[in-house]
Image (cartoon, grey):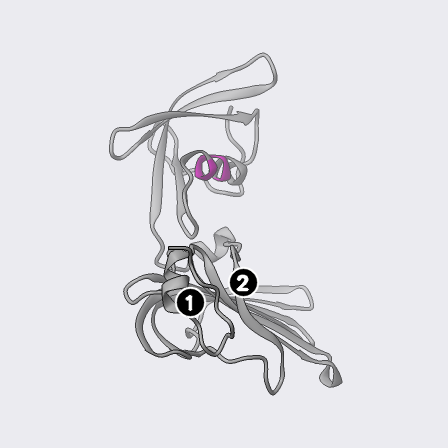
Amino acid sequence: LEPVPCTSPRSPCWSWLLAMECKAWVRHRDHCHWSWLSRSAWVFPDGLAVGRQVQYFSKSVQDHVEEMWAIGEVVGIESDDMVEFAWSGAASFVDNYGDFQWEKCSPPSGVLHLEEAGRGDRDAGWEDDFQIEWPSEVLALLPVPTFVVTVSSHEATADGQVRVELGTVAGDHFEVFIKQRADVRAFMEAVANHRQLDPPVRVCVMSSDGATMEPDSRLPF
């Protein structure tokens, strides 16, 4: 059967949401009188159901910028307009006139009311394929899965790239091509793309002698 679209954010069709991947409830707020803007998103990468993952992101701009990320699990769907969560961790970023702060923080509310845009809301509703960006500083503060790879060998190619052979803890081997002397952060992204790792997953790159390569460093080849 073809999924039936929801006619209203207040009356979602749960079977439709389960059939769709990476659904997100996104809420925008705009208080021009105080020059204050905010956006919050609850992302369900595997569909909305009890026991499945929920990812959260919010950003507010007033006299400074605040952002929050969180991951957790759906623990209850009490009615057509309320979802309950259990959060496993949260992290925040504050840009206070150039003073950057990354730290663990209290998680967002454990209850989400699926309501139409109302008082203070400019817009609220479901969006398809909404994705959250996960900075490495955030992943380091959250209890997220880690994908560990070890450099087995590397060889320069004629086009200025390097063919890097990598091994996993499970004994798998694969190759990734990267620009010579690229930064480790770009290499981690190349590994995640090659393995089709869904965020938030932290990639950890180990050298052949067992040392961890820091994201802000450069590859030694």
Q: Is residue 18 above or below residue 83?
A: above
Numbered disc 1: secondary structure: strand
Label 1 neighbourhood size at 10 Å, few (<14), some (14-19), many (20+)? many
Which of disc 2 and disc 1 is earlier in sequence?
Answer: 1
Which span of residues is magenta-colored? 189-193
Tell me residue 83's x, y (percent).
Answer: 37, 75
Overall secondary structure of the magenta stretch?
A: helix
Query: Regarding mark 2 in the picture, which secondary structure is present there?
Result: strand
Q: Residue furthest top?
A: 158
At 53% from the left edge and 54% from the top edge, which residue is drawn?
133
Residue visible at 36% across and 64% down in the picture: 15
Indicate whether 89 appears above or below 117.
above
- At label 2, which amino acid type do we have? Glu
Q: Is residue 158 left or right of residue 205?
A: right
Residue located beneath label 1 in the image? 90
- Which numbered tag is attached to residue 137? none
According to the image, label 2 marks what residue?
127
User: Where does the image place residue 141, in percent across and percent down from the top left?
Assistant: 42, 59
Give the CA distance from mark 1 to mark 2.
Answer: 23 Å
Question: Is residue 52 something that shows in the picture?
Answer: yes
Q: Nearer the viewer, residue 154 or 198?
A: 198
Residue furthest front as drawn = 1
* Residue nearest the viewer, comparing 70 with 5: 5
Crowd class of label 2 (few under 14; some 14 to 19; many from 20; radius 10 Å)? few
Is residue 27 visible to the viewer in this orientation of the structure?
no
Looking at the image, residue 173 lies above or below residue 75: above
Residue at 28% over, 64% down:
51
Q: Looking at the picture, how far across and down is residue 114, in whole percent?
A: 47, 77
Amino acid marked by disc 1? Ala
Q: Specify the quadrant of the image occupied by residue 175.
A: top left
Q: Determine if the magenta segment contains residue 191.
A: yes
